[in-house]
Image (cartoon, rainbow, N blue to C red):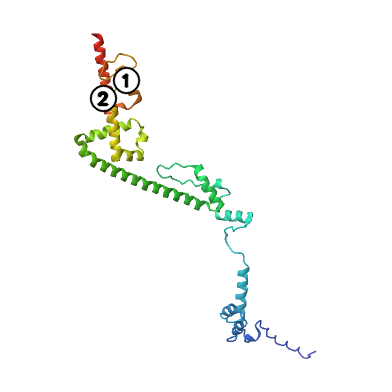
Amino acid sequence: MGGTPPAAAPPAAAPAHFFGAHVQDQGAFKEGWTENLRAAGYERLANKAAYAKDEASLLRTLDETIGFVGKKPVGISYPKDGATDEDVSAYRHDAGVPDSADAYDLKPASLPDGVAWDDAGVKPYAEIFHKHHIPQAAAAALIEQHLNTVIGQVGAGQVAMEAKIGDFAKASEATYQKEWGDSYDSRLESNRAFVASRFDPAEMADPVLQAALSHPKFVRVIDEARRALREAPLPGVGREVTAGSHSPRQQAMEIMKANPAWRNDSGLAQRVGDLYALDAQQAKRAKK
């Protein structure tokens, strides 16, 4: 019954190493083992393997590297030439690109002073944005910056125009104050009234017209035209005129009708007054 006990199991054999003779019994690499990799032409692998202390750590590093290389890149990629509709659609969805050009919202929350929004004028920009897959936020920022740039350019142009008007005005003053003497201010005012009677207020406010009215040579042209119109003889003035289509009163009425702002022109006002005075004289004579 006692018998002999069973024999003990033999010790487990040491596991074979993946890197064979390059690994010590405890699994650590032998010194200089990577030189064999370099000699075989695997320079990058040799550099990477040199950091591994033992076989297990090197195997983990290689496994992680293979997993990283095979992993799909995270994020989105701009559609290249030949991209499928699905790729383009996926990119636009992830990047925030509207589904169509009409779907862009490009109107800023507040517009610069004097700027009116024009949907039709902005549509070509939206079409370009959509064609090149520009996200909504970037497109809106581009439009806002464009508006600010244009307003800045317009403002700079207006400042330059105002400076030019000021230069013209100074040149005119230097030219005509000495020539016209005490009548300078009244003649200048009459000249502007003469022009104003032929333009509406909006036209008079045009910077281009203001510049012209301030130009020394144009100031002289206006003065000469006003004086010539005031001094030109009228039918019936200075001689007897019978009542009818060319009576002084009717001539005055024709002047007032043709020049609604005649009161602002001292020359026209004087002519109207002279014609009415002449009409009164003729009426007085007719009663004698």
**Quick one: SS at disc 1?**
helix
Q: Which residue is mark 1?
A: 251
At 26% from the left edge and 14% from the top edge, which residue is drawn? Answer: 282
**Horizontal relation, residue 246 to residue 71: left or right:** left
At 25% from the left edge and 21% from the top edge, which residue is drawn? Answer: 274
In this view, 132 is above or below 218? below
Name the one closer to the observer, 106 or 206: 206
In this view, 204 is above or below 18? above
At 55% from the left edge and 47% from the top edge, which residue is drawn? Answer: 101
How far apart marks 2 and 1 lie (CA) works out to 13 Å
Question: To which quarter of the image does residue 175 belong?
Answer: top left
Residue 241 in the image: state x and y as whole percent.
29, 15
Q: Residue reaching furthest left?
A: 182
- Which kind of residue does numbered mark 2 sit on? Gln
Name the one closer to the observer, 276 or 29: 276
- Which quadrant, please, contains the N terminus? bottom right
> Which is more foreground, mark 2 or mark 1?
1
- Which kind of residue does numbered mark 1 sit on? Gln
**Quick one: SS at disc 2?**
helix
**Horizontal relation, residue 246 to residue 32: left or right:** left
In this view, 178 is above or below 285? below
Q: Which mark, residue 270?
A: 2
Name the one closer to the observer, 26 or 151: 151
- Which quadrant, please, contains the C terminus? top left
Question: To which quarter of the image does residue 32 belong?
Answer: bottom right
